[in-house]
Structures are given as C-alpha cells and as structure tokens.
Image (spheres, grey):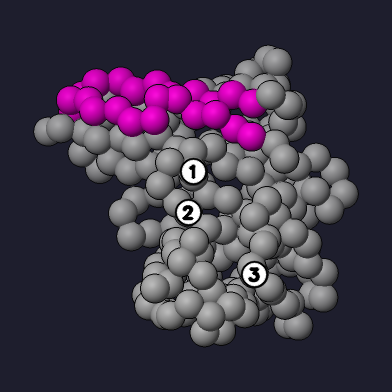
Amino acid sequence: GQQLNQSPQSMFIQEGEDVSMNCTSSSIFNTWLWYKQEPGEGPVLLIALYKAGELTSNGRLTAQFGITRKDSFLNISASIPSDVGIYFCAGPGAGGTSYGKLTFGQGTILTVHP
Amino acid sequence: EAQVTQNPRYLITVTGKKLTVTCSQNMNHEYMSWYRQDPGLGLRQIYYSMNVEVTDKGDVPEGYKVSRKEKRNFPLILESPSPNQTSLYFCASSKLRDRANYGYTFGSGTRLTVV
C-alpha cells in the first residue's frame, strides 16, 4: 500500500521557536491532510490541502502541498506550550472505493519547553 | 454535540476471548473507519465503510471483523484476540463525499491490552 514518511520523528524546542516538519511519499497524492493528536485524544484535523503548490494557513500553522504532489510541509511559527502533541500527515487513496483508504505518516512528536 | 463515541475506553482481556469495541456517530456521516495506533507506526487503517452494508479492508485487517448494519454504528470485532493486537484503537467518521469536509472526526480511543 501507499506509505508516508514523516520527519523528524521528534522535536524538542524552546517556546517561541519556529517548527518545520515534512512528509514524503513514493506515490502521488491528490490531497494532503495534517492532523494533531493531544495526549489521550484522537487526532484533530488542522489543515487540508487539495492542489499542488497550495499554501494554506490556520493561525500560526502553515502547510504546503508540494509541486511534485509527493510531499507536504507543515510549519508552526512562534511555538507555545499548547503546541505539544503528535503531528500526522495523511493522504487518501485516489478514486473509487480507494477514496476511503486514508494513509497516515508515522507522526512527529513535538515537545515545547517553556 | 457532534461526536464519535467509542466504548470501552480501556479493556484488558485474555487471549482468545471474543470482544467487540463499539463505535457510534451522531453526524449522519456515510464514511466510518477503524485505525490502530502503535508507537513509531502512526495510525494504520484496519477497515473502512463507505456506507451501510459496504465495508472494505484497510492496510491491517487480519484478525478483525466489522459490520455496518446501520449508518450510525460501526463495531470492531476481535473473534480471537492475540497479544499482538494490544494497541490503541480509534474510530473515525466523515461526510466523505464533500471534499471540503475532509475533516474526519475521531473518537477518543480504546486502549486494548490482550494478555
């Protein structure tokens, strides 16, 4: 099946720093999704990207859909302690019933020190 | 409140004892899915359902069964659980047909331990 590789696997940063993480795939995706999971909870959608080259922001978060359609990037500016969590990229299969197959990356664990 | 409800939140069971984890959503979503989360592996899809009576395998379906007899419910069945099914399980739902609504809503998770 499709695989998504996220990096880095974990990050330890100081409050106020900017954060960058990315997700790559060996196959093309038509949609890229970024989720955040807080301890003890299910993932929550942060940003959805639908078009190659698209740049979308959600507050301090900005995500980009790579031109090749095989990668995506998430940036967090001026991190704060509540940014702590696991960030996942995800992409659905293309067309027909494979539309329901959603593949997740391994996740990036973010720790923010006050 | 729009939500996906999973039960139980925590479950410890013994090898081979059949169990069911329930999932219910109140948003009239067509699409529902089950995932398992393991450290370093992210979330892996077990089964999904595009609508009532329509189910399909995800990436790791072995050892699991599902059914979708009603739109709101999508139970996950482990007929003969084994220790390698110890994991954190999530149910999710979405109004998949609307591309602008790709916001899958996840339940709060079920932590299963098989001894």
User: Which chain does the numbered disc 3 sit on?
Assistant: B
Left or right: where does residue B73 sit relative to residue A5?
right
Front one among A40 and B78: B78
Q: Magenta segment, which residues?
A: A3-25
Q: CA distance from mark 1 to mark 2?
A: 7 Å
Q: Which residue is mark 1?
A: B41
Q: Earlier in the sequence, mark 1 or mark 3?
A: 1
Q: Quadrant of the C terminus of chain B?
A: bottom left
| Residue B39 appears in view | yes
Quick check: is A9 in the magenta stretch? yes
On the question of residue B98 being in view, the answer is no
**Residue B78 versus residue A85 in the image, above or below:** below
Q: Chain of mark 1?
A: B
- Residue placed under numbered mark 3 in the picture: B64
Residue at screen point 15% across, 32% down = A113
Q: Spatial distance from mark 1 to mark 3, Cα to Cα? A: 18 Å
Q: CA distance from mark 3 to mark 2?
A: 15 Å
How far across and how far down the image is residue A43, in percent? 46, 52
The disc labelled 2 sits on which kind of residue?
Gln
Q: Main secondary structure of the magenta part?
A: strand
For label 2, the residue is: B37
When the figure is inspected, residue B33 is found, relative to residue B115, above or below; the finding is above
Of the pair A72 and B100, the residue shown nearer to us:
A72
Label 1: how many Cα within 10 Å (few below 14, some 14–19, many 20+)? few
